[in-house]
């Protein structure tokens, strides 16, 4: 039976997913071992039930991120904070230190102060998700089993983590020379 694998992209740059794609030939090996059930690289609209492992990239920035995270936690056995934005909130959390006050100030700054053309904050429902007062790492919103740091994590680290998990080995994410196989 194949491992049901999901990958999720929250508030981040997609660099972690690009690094995942840098697994090159190991991706071919993964085809035999995993079923990708949800990811930005597949066209699935709803996060499924009974997911074995989910790699979550990006910080928790808005209500949509938070809602998805709670759904993921309910439906997933093992969650991996995938990259520095998920592990520490990293670059997206710069918003926390900007001294802009509240989320309305952030929108004002982004859509009006810095706008070159047509300065206005989008108002229609579903256009801009409700921002959280504070950007946070994934583990502040839900329980996380493993942390895979890096900006982005190198493909060799991703391979080591995924390879260990698929082999039934408790992942050891320590040191600079993580190896698998």
Image (cartoon, helix red, strand yellow):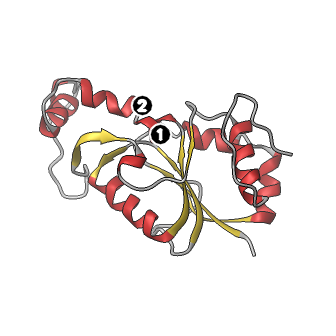
Relative side of 166 to 115, left or right:
right
Rendered residue at 71%/51% (across/down): 162
Q: Are marks 2 and 1 in contact (CB under 8 Å)?
A: yes
* Residue plotted at (81% across, 65% down): 32
Q: Is residue 2 above or below residue 58?
A: below
User: Looking at the image, which is closer to me, 125 or 68?
Assistant: 68
- Give the quadrant of residue 43: bottom right
User: 181 and 172: which one is in front?
Assistant: 172
Q: Secondary structure at mark 2?
A: loop
Q: Residues within 10 Å of mark 2 (few under 14, many from 20)?
A: some
Residue found 57% across the figure and 69% down from its top: 51
Residue 87 - label = 1
Q: Quadrant of residue 67?
A: bottom left
x and y percentages locating residue 118 in the rendered image: 18, 33
Q: Quadrant of the N terminus?
A: bottom right
Check disc 1: other Cα within 10 Å, few if <14, some if 14-19, many if 20+.
Answer: many
Instruction: Give the x, y percent position of residue 156.
Output: 74, 37
Q: Which mark is residue 6?
A: none
State the CA–CA distance, disc 2 to disc 1. 8 Å
- Residue that badge 2 annotates: 90
Is residue 114 or residue 70 the one in the foreground?
A: 70
Q: Is residue 112 left or right of residue 128?
A: left
**Does residue 101 appear left or right of residue 45 in this picture?**
left
Q: Residue at x 59, y 54 (%)?
A: 41
**Going by the picture, which residue comes out furthest to the right?**
181
Q: Is residue 43 above or below residue 144?
A: below
Picture coordinates of residue 52, whole percent (x, y): 61, 67
């Amino acid at each position: 039976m194949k491992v049901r694998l999901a990958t999720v992209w929250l508030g981040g740059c997609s660099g972690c997913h690009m690094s995942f794609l840098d697994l090159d030939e190991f991706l071919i090996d993964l085809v035999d071992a995993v079923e990708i059930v949800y990811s930005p690289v597949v066209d699935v609209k709803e996060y499924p039930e009974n997911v074995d492992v989910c790699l979550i990239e990006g910080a928790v920035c808005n209500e949509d991120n938070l809602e998805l995270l709670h759904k993921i936690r309910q439906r997933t056995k093992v969650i991996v904070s995938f990259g520095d934005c998920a592990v520490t909130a990293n670059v997206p959390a710069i918003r926390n230190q900007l001294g802009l006050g509240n989320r309305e100030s952030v929108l004002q700054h982004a859509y009006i102060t810095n706008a070159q053309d047509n300065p206005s904050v989008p108002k229609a429902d579903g256009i801009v998700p409700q921002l959280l007062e504070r950007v946070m790492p994934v583990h502040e919103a839900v329980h996380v089993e493993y942390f895979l740091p890096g900006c982005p994590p190198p493909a060799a680290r991703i391979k080591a983590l995924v390879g260990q998990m698929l082999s039934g080995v408790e992942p050891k994410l320590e040191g600079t020379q993580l190896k698998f196989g």
